[in-house]
Image (cartoon, grey):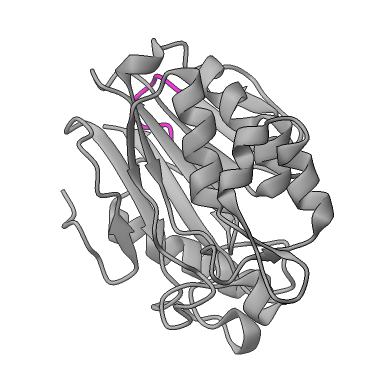
């Protein structure tokens, strides 16, 4: 059993059952250099392959992972794969009901969303940037869990906060044109653009699905450079990993 905070990652702070392990890595404790300093675990951002492999090895050792994480090819879509069955191709969400299967997403401003059944029988994860949220990634991963919504626990990992996340009319319209209530997650700014709250958008969609136990949220990857990578602040940059599995 690892502590709630290791040198390389922090545990999700939520009332999940004891057999559910959920963590998010930080940016320190690795070997990457420059823009990827130091614990980049993404292989698609231009970092040295050796460094990525060593960072992943260190993270796996620190968390005593039961196996290699299932790294997804993320495309800001709504496809969710069941890791207990053969799968391939791009996806932005994953679910599993087997012990030792590690679900994972990579983020550096987008919102990682972790899910667990109250009885510890199933877990899931989603990569939810604004495009994924608008496309329905949360609706898709909740459906893939195959658990009554009121029996689900959800944790919202670190994402860019509303004070830092400026977007244009296209992003505003993607949500508000489909759902007028989504306007509450946007605040106009002095530059004629919008400050968007990914956490609020996610909570709205989850509650509409009937999910009531929602935890986390409130971090800001952009404003905490000592802790998190942020694509908006420093692209190109590394990525954090959010991980969840059943013991």
- x 34%, y 41%: residue: 66
Measuring 50% from the left and 46% from the top, which residue is drawn there?
A: 200
Residue at 67% x, 70% y is: 189
Quarter holding residue 132: top right
In the image, taking residue 126 as reference, residue 194 lies left or right, namely right
Determine whether 79 is above or below 163 in the image: above
| Residue 173 in which image quadrant | top right
Q: Nearer the viewer, residue 86 or 111?
A: 111
Q: Position of residue 24 (x, y in %)?
A: 40, 56
Which residue is at the front of the view, 175 or 227?
A: 175
Name the dominant secondary structure of the magenta segment. loop
Image quadrant assignment for residue 138? top right
Left or right of 139: which side holds 194? Answer: right
Query: Magenta segment: does it hold 84?
Result: no
Give residue 26's position: percent from left, percent from top.
41, 69
Residue 70 screen position, x and y as percent: 55, 40
Residue 144 horizontal/vertical position (percent) = 54, 17
Whether the magenta-drawn stretch holds residue 97 is answered as yes
Q: What stretch is highlighted in magenta?
A: 96-101
Q: Nearer the viewer, residue 198 or 73?
A: 198
Q: In this view, does 224 lie to the left or right of 238?
A: left
Can the viewer see residue 84? no
Vertical placement of residue 109 versus 202, above or below: below
């Amino acid at each position: 059993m690892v502590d709630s905070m290791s040198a390389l990652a922090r545990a999700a702070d939520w009332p999940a059952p004891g057999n559910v392990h959920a963590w998010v890595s930080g940016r320190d404790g690795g070997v990457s250099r420059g823009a990827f300093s130091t614990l980049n675990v993404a292989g698609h951002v231009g970092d040295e392959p050796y460094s990525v492999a060593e960072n992943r090895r260190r993270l796996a050792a620190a968390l005593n992972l039961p196996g290699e994480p299932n790294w997804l090819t993320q495309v800001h879509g709504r496809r969710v794969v069941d890791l207990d069955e053969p799968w391939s191709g791009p996806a932005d969400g994953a679910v599993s009901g087997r012990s030792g299967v590690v679900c994972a997403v990579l983020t550096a401003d987008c919102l990682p969303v972790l899910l667990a059944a109250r009885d510890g029988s199933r877990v899931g994860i989603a990569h939810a940037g604004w495009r994924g949220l608008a496309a329905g990634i949360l609706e898709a991963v909740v459906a893939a869990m195959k658990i009554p919504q009121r029996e689900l626990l959800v944790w919202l990992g670190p994402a860019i906060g509303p004070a830092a996340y400026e977007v244009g009319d296209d992003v505003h319209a993607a949500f508000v044109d489909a759902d007028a209530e989504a306007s509450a997650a946007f605040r106009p700014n002095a530059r004629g653009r919008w400050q968007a709250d990914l956490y609020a958008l996610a909570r709205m969609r989850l509650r509409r699905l009937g999910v009531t136990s929602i935890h986390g949220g409130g971090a800001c990857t952009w404003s905490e450079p000592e802790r998190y990578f942020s694509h908006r602040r420093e692209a190109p940059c590394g990525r954090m990993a959010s991980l969840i599995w059943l013991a």
